[in-house]
Image: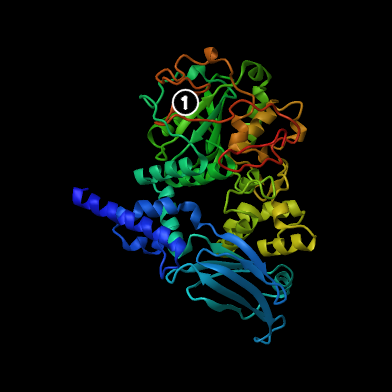
Amino acid sequence: MTSSSIFTSLITILVLSFLFFLCIQVKLPFHPRDVLPLLPRQLSYPIVKSLNSPVDILPTFVGAASSDNVSVEWKGACFYENTAWMEFHNKSGSQFGGGTLHIKVTKAHSWTCMDLYVFATPYRVTWDYYLISREHTLEIKEWEGKAEYEYVKHHGVSIFLMQAGMIGTLQALWDVFPLFTNTGWGENSNIGFLEKHMGAVFETRPQPWVTNLTADDIQSGDFLAISKIRGRWGGFETLEKWVSGAYAGHSAVCLRDSDGKLWVGESGHENEEGEDIIAMVPWDEWWEFEQNKDDANPHIALLPLHPNIRAKFNETAAWEYARSTDGEPYGYHNMIFSWIDTIDGNYPPPLDAHVVASVMTVWNQLKPAYASNLWNEALNKRLGTKGLELPDILVEVEKRGSSFDKLLTIPEQDDWLYNDGKSTSCIAFVLALYKAAGLFEPFSESIQVTEFTIKDAYTLKFFETDSSRLPSWCNDADDVKLPYCQIKGKYRMELPGYNTMVPYPHMNERCPSLPPKYSRPQNC
């Protein structure tokens, strides 16, 4: 950048600062944030980035409008005074009629801003935006049937505000996109997200970034914590880490057979058909792939078992469990339920149970088979029902005098059978193998490993505590001696709370997980 462009940028920033101050004192016909996209990208982009983030793509629940006798009031991002109420009518002449949602918006902070909204019931999702201070309406010509009519009459149409407004939401979409791209841009975006929203630190390790390890030092039961930071899985893991507090996004376990050959057990292994399955893979094949073919830039740490824990590890029982699940599908059914344990202590803002329900509703309409695989069957398990679709689930839980947020917190049970068998995610597979091998005794019967996140796993007090017993190649090139062996990755892997939690009955069934500290009470 030339000296003249630097001077111009400084002047523009000073003007913007003055305008931001002035808009607090006097109502301007525009808000300085509204004109940022009109400025040169090299100037506006860093400012917009500081004001918005990928989480701005998430809506905020502001209330539910159920009748014209009860109104909902809230403060918007553009309009500071807003009121909504529902009017039922039968303009369609149908059995249950339809309705008009009235939204009155006033007190805009500028003449150029707008508010963007999403409106949802269990049976429909729509959206609208408002630029003018007045009463607006959203027409619903006809309810889907008695179930939607009764639901709206008692619980209302849910209203969600996109807090970042139109421009901020579009910016957030632009920021979310690179999280899933297999590029340097994507990697930097994932790192930036985790630094900003989790307080994660990415310190560069001395080279070489791949350890010249000796596989003979790896034993049955040793845990593999894996963190991917680019591509499809990198983006997914970033969001998983944010909501759960885990500093790794994938896991696997090592096993030696009766001939001494080393294998890796993994739920989430991609087979030749592109399906994610549970598989036992020879170590050499697995390690070769992670070093040279996994384009998600995986960072990998080996967590050796403590000698006392290793002495309890029943290798025969572990192999029996591994063989019984080999080839079964990855456990998508219960994946989100290991994260949600409480009504309001697991949702980083602006997430909450209302947002989760609205996202599920959208997916249920766009991809019903996908939605059924991810949560419908698991929600039916919690209700004790079979075959209910999401709208019917939402109605049924309200009929029973409960609520959707409470339904989500019901603990998963390891013995639940889904349409394709027991459902085990990557971490559930590893811990189910540990459970079969006797590591959770004497509490095995009262511990549901499908309730564990990856963080819950690496904080178990199962691992080596004496660094002198770690293999000689463990972190040998690093000037920081971790209590575990990082075997791959440019950045040093941190695992907060590592090796601190002794198992107890009903472990991890009622634990909050709010960033950035992810604090949890004892024995939750």
Nearer to us in this view, 502 or 100: 100
- Residue type at mark 1? Gln
Nearer to us in this view, 259 or 165: 165
Spot the residue most to the top.
Answer: 468
User: Viewed as shown, does residue 34 lie left or right of 439?
Assistant: left
Quadrant of the rendered structure where residue 161 is? bottom right
Q: Height in image: 27 above or below 340?
A: below
Query: Which residue is pictured at 35% across the width and 61% down the height?
Result: 37
Image quadrant occupied by the C terminus: top right
Quadrant of the rendered structure where residue 31 is? bottom left
Query: Which residue is pictured at 49% across the width and 42% down the height?
Result: 271
Query: Which residue is pictured at 57% across the width and 51% down the height?
Result: 349
Q: Height in image: 486 above or below 407?
A: above
Q: Height in image: 435 above or below 177?
A: above
| Residue marked by disc 1 | 486
Residue 122 visible in the displayed image: no
Provide residue 63's location: percent of width, then percent of height. 64, 64
Q: Height in image: 6 above or below 137?
A: above
Residue 75 visible in the displayed image: yes
Coloring scheme used: rainbow
Provide residue 297's location: percent of width, then percent of height. 41, 37
Question: SS at mark 1?
Answer: strand
Spot the residue most to the front.
Answer: 25
Provide residue 228's location: percent of width, then percent of height. 46, 39
